[in-house]
Image (tube, grey):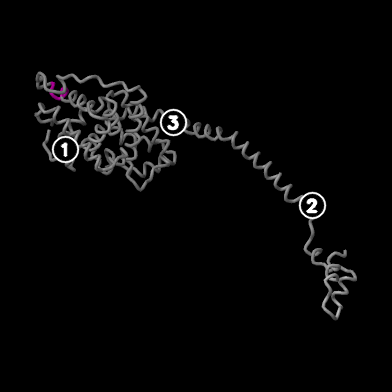
Amino acid sequence: MTEQPSFDHRPDPELGAALRAALEPKDDHAAFAARVLAQYDHALDRSSVAMFDVLASWFRPGMVAAAAALVLGILLGRTVFQSPDTTSIDAAMAPVEGPGLAALVTAQDPPDASVVFTSLVEP
Amino acid sequence: MGGEGGGPADQALVAQTLAGDRAAFGSLVERYAGQARRVARAVLGDPDDADDAAQDGFLSALVKLGQYDARRPFGPWLMRIVANAATDRRRRRNVRRVEPLDTSLVGGGPRPDAAAVRNELGDRLRAALAELPERRRKAVVLFDVEGYSHAEIAGILGIPEGTVRSEVFHARRRLRTLLADFKEPIG
């Protein structure tokens, strides 16, 4: 074999040719190609089947997860939208009629603490 | 490093294959059949096993063709798949251990007749290759037989480029030692 320095970056043509001859198949490559092509459709079908197998394996857990999410959403929705004692902002801001409030608004002097309290607790 | 022979570029054939052109895939197979079979044989030794592995590699490449990056050369991508298919097959056959090498094959022995030199050399080379670690075998065949660069082989084998250089160096040294008595021109 050709003597070449260590870590030579060039291929060794003599060794390469000898190895190539040693590894070369006896039959021609056309027959091999025909053999591979005979499996063409089968390989593609098999890959499609494998993809559907993967999807099918995820179907049941996916359905369970979707159902769980739906139930959780319904429960949360009912909790939020059915809370009691809801008051609109208009009702909260509406003036409360009554003597206490009138006395507070019309008095010349600063209001007494009892008047203020009365205006708050009177309906 | 391209395939063997002329014709349309690999990328064009890949695009046609992806579009469902069976003949284009056939052209790719014919173009790379030699490389794939030799690389697989370097891994497996047995030519029938090697052809099975090469076929597995081509069909696996067909299924994965959508993952191929057309900006990169096709050969190294394919050879990686073929080399892995050969390694997988080698493992699956339960590591059918390489027969202990006949010392008359690897280390001298009686000199064959001139007419049998080529066959004898082939036997010795295959026996010598079988002695090498699998990665070293792949590296030297991809470099010295198939003409891939160190960088491409690094991508194929998934190892650093420096390791490829080391593997090729050690493989060559071993092969040259084992075949030292064959000095005739190979032709």
Q: Chain of mark 3?
A: A
In the foreground, A116 or B181? A116
- Magenta-highlighted residues: B116-120
Mark 3 or 1: the one toward you: 1
Q: Which residue is mark 2?
A: A84
Question: Which disc, if any, is residue A43?
Answer: 3
| Image coords of residue B4 (percent x, y) | 27, 38
Say if the magenta span includes residue A77.
no
Q: Residues within 10 Å of mark 2 (few under 14, many from 20)?
A: few
Q: Locate residue B119 relative to residue A48 in the image: left or right.
A: left
Quarter of the image with the C terminus of chain A in it: bottom right
Question: Which disc, if any, is residue A12?
Answer: 1
Q: Amino acid at mark 1?
A: Asp
| Image coords of residue A67 (percent x, y) | 66, 39
At numbered mark 1, what does the secondary structure look like: helix, strand or loop? loop
* Residue B75 in sight in this render: no
Q: Is residue A70 above or below residue B41?
A: below
Residue drawn at 37 percent across, 46 percent down: B70
